[in-house]
Image (spheres, rainbow, N blue to C red):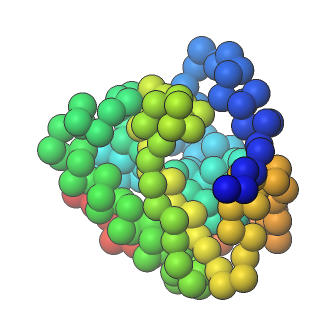
Amino acid sequence: MDVLWAPWRGTYVRAPRAEACFLCEAAVAPEGDAARFVVWRSRRTFVVLNTFPYTTGHLMVAPYRHVGEVEALDGEEQADLMAALGTSIAALRRALHPDGFNVGLNLGRVAGAGLEGHLHVHVVPRWQGDTNFLPVLGAVKVIPDHLEVTYRQLRETFAGSPPRP
């Protein structure tokens, strides 16, 4: 069996974390959406660009409430999270035309969660022939657009999405 080493990831996982939750800060301050790259809000969840993306358009969908486990979400939060996930994928399809997506959650530090206490779903657009998981394994990223350019493009696209009750 071949083994691919990513020692930088171990350093990141073991590093001490900041006290403040960046998702909670984004959740309670809609006036700061542009500075925090929040592209869309619904009643129970919001969508934010990942500022350390694997690919262009890498989004995170999170509930407003600081909760770390799926089973701790109430029914309305679960439904809204899934609806926001669908809205996010549809917006990414319209804006960036990816060939596919990786969608997932990292629950717990050992599973790769950089922010354990605030559940969030990663939505990573993928294109045929892209770098796959080279960013994870090789500590290399290919991001063709500046984050602010992607933010403006997605913010406009999400503006055309139907509001959630």
Question: How far across and how far down the image is residue 142, in percent?
Answer: 82, 65
| Whether residue 125 is visible | yes
Which of the 4 image quadrants contains residue 89?
bottom left
Which of the 4 image quadrants contains residue 143?
bottom right
Q: Which quadrant would the C terminus be assigned to in this image?
A: bottom left
- Residue shown at 65%/71% (left/top)? 153
Q: Nearer the viewer, residue 126 or 63?
A: 126
| Whether residue 145 is visible | no
Q: With 139 as the anchor, is 23 left or right in this view?
A: left
Where 155 falls versus 23 (above or below)?
Answer: below
Question: How far across and how far down the image is residue 35, in percent?
Answer: 68, 44
Q: With 56 as the anchor, is 101 left or right in this view?
A: left
Query: How many numbered circles are shown?
Result: 0
- Residue shown at 68%/61% (left/top)? 133
Q: Which quadrant would the N terminus be assigned to in this image?
A: bottom right
Where 156 falls versus 9 (above or below)?
Answer: below
Q: Nearer the viewer, residue 73 or 150?
A: 73
Where 12 falls versus 88 (above or below)?
Answer: above
- Residue shown at 72%/82% (left/top)? 129
